[in-house]
Image (cartoon, rainbow, N blue to C red):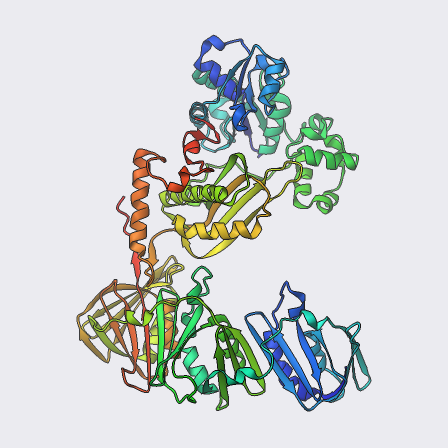
Amino acid sequence: MSKVIMLTDMESFFASVEVAKNPSLQGRPVVVCGDPQRRHGIVLAASREAKAFGVKTGMVAGQGSRLCPHAVFIRPHMQDYLDVSLKITGILHGFSDRIAPYSIDEQFLDVTGCEKLFGSPEEMAQRIIEEIWRQTRVRGRVGIGENPLQAKMACDNFAKKNKTGIFRLSGGNYARLTWPLPIRCLFGVGVRMERNFFNIGVTKIGHLAGLTREDLARRWGINGEVLWQNAHGFDASRIEAPAGYEDRKGVGNMVTLPRDYRKKHEIEVVLLEITEEVCRRARRMGKVGWVANVYCRGADFDVPTGFSRQMRMPEPTAAAMDVYPRVLKIFYTHWDYRPVRTLGVTLSGLIDFADYQLSLTENREKKIALNRAMDIIRARYGATSLFRLSSLESGGMLFDRASKIGGHEA
Amino acid sequence: MHIIANCNSLLEILSIVERTVPVRSTIPVINGILIEAEKDELFFSSTNLDIGVRSSNKDAQIDGQGSTVLPVKFVDILRQLPSPMVEITVDQETYRTEIKSGKARFFLYGMNSQEFPSFTPGEEWKKWTMISLSSDEFKNIFKKVIFAVSSDESKPPFRGILMEKDEQNLLTCLASDTYRLACLQQQVSIEERGATFRLLVPGKSLHELLRIIDKGEERINGYFKDHEIIFTYREFTFYMRLLEDRYPNLINVFPVNYQTRITVGKELLEQTIGRALLLAQGYNHMISLQIEDNVLKVKAGSEMGRMDEELELIKKEGDDLEEILINARYFLDPLRVIGRESIVIDFNGFLGPCIFNCGSEGDVSRYRYLVLPIKVDKKDH
């Protein structure tokens, strides 16, 4: 029996939430964008009315205001969007427990076998959209397919463009409907792959489907094979109840710096802050990790530089002062001394923290107790209640980050 | 450079020199063996940057001086040549090397020997301070401590073995990875040249050396000065750097008293702990020990299952011992190298150190090993 998978997507999500909060904005062009001074000055969402003037997500804020000067520009409120997103997850839970959030405004759900309860997939989708509208005043769209890929393709290429906001793809109509579309419309094809495909004369999804799987595997490896499968509407992945803390393999954090960092001490401050944060999260889960990973991305977009490298530590730990020397070692082994735009640290190879070997040279009991005390204070009084002095130095991001979610204002 | 030599005579040396060639180094030149012809002597050298080895052969017939670095395959080629004699010709311009034996002919592409790391030249070092042991003694001493050396690069001094000698010719060798500590003290008959010393020899290099030397009465001489130690063994010379990190005064951590002291058959204990290790828990290889009356109770349990075993003690002094958690590997390591029928082990409560004793103060040879227990984290939140 084929499955029924849905992808729900919210129209102009951030903008819609802003309008729902402030009904006086109803019918006016609304643009949510970051602070232009701090490099987050891009359009995060534009309402349907603003989009009519050509404002697009990802565009520089200045360009948006030139296209639509009379629009209402609003700074993001990430906490509100998160709340609404969770509320939508709650609504979807009324239909199925097999839910996989894909982004803040997209969630997959597997409704196979729910027809007796809620009617045909199209009827069910209609009910979902109505329920989301009733509770959140955000307009949803639903793509339906036999697997997550078909659902995503149905949503992005059809449901978003039709009146009902619902569209269903299946093994039967997938080729007929998607093959005439430009190659860019295929899930997984970005600017780079599009250019690669143009170079071999592939401009439509159907052209790609006409190539052999082996040919694609030879040219682009696994990625080539996956795209070939996408072109045929094949996707073996499943939507299951989300993995909880238990199955987490790593905890990581990444920071985009407010300006390019060139100086060692500024970079070190940020690396220490992220390491602290990552270790704190691991400890909250009652875990210690074997592997430290450092991610770094250079500032120059035209010459992409950077690395992601890891190191297995001699014993698992979740103490920042054990992990940090390794983080520095990895960083200085691989850094090319060019300006840095993004930094990240991940602690993986997580296992339960249950016991520890005593040492002749350090008081581990004391160290563990100290970390625990810091965690309790921060949990009760906030991330900025207790911090390393280095966070006050130039380059420190702690206070900036404490007031944000996902890099945008909470 | 032109050499005519007996293959077996060369292989005797090369089979040892080749052991130090790194498997795959990023520095191309050290992936090979350095060959130097000087007057009537032939030298072979190799290094993995931790340890360097050099040896000479005087049996070869040499025409013209010269040198090159040949791939380690060279040794395999010698092993399979059809005739016992080999003729080697090196073009000093191109380092192209011709190897002829019987009707077989090989050409190898050699490298410029200028890039090969140089060892301490000459024989001046033979006048440095020296320590001399038989290879049996040498192996015996170091195998008892080397397993406790740390490989963690973030603890620099603990990558070394501390070698110390006092005025009374008492040699102390000590190694620790901060969780345990192995210490061997032995009266040695050292040729008197410089009374006391304190050296930190890198564990990795010493491990290589132990691998190379065979059992026997042959002498191993160590000459040292500043940051270098040079060992000679048969016709081989081994070059090592000493570590320069400060080593803490760990010998003081052995406690004077004990709460529980047991005497137990070494063989039996080794077997019991070996069985417990099979089901030891987690990366700490945790097992539990308990002493009640005259019995040692050993328990282990992991996701796979559980085991327990009781062991009769030969003798018990002091209190009973409530459950102590310990890394079974750390407990087993010394048992494997102790050559005695019974062993005395001291305990100091379930969070205090546990000490293995072989011999006591004043003995010709005294071996002590200390291991710290594992603590369970009590979650109070």
Quadrant of the snapshot with the N terminus of chain B: bottom right
Quadrant of the snapshot with the C terminus of chain B: top left
Q: Look at the picture and state if B371 lies above or below B12.
A: above
In percent of width and height, residue B105 lies at: 81, 80
Classify residue A36 by image quadrant. top right
Numbered label tally: 0
Q: Nearer the viewer, residue B90 or B350?
A: B90
Q: Nearer the viewer, residue B91 or B10?
A: B91
Q: Look at the picture and state if B50 lies above or below A312.
A: below
Q: Nearer the viewer, residue A165 or A275?
A: A275
User: Which residue is painted at 24% across and 63% down in the image?
Assistant: B350
In percent of width and height, residue A353 lies at: 36, 51
User: Which residue is painted at 26% across and 64% down in the image?
Assistant: B324
In percent of width and height, residue B101 lies at: 78, 85
User: Which residue is painted at 74% across and 30% down in the image?
Assistant: A204
Left of A313 or right of it: where is B5? right
Q: Look at the picture and state if A149 lies above or below A28.
A: below
Q: Is residue B54 visible?
A: yes
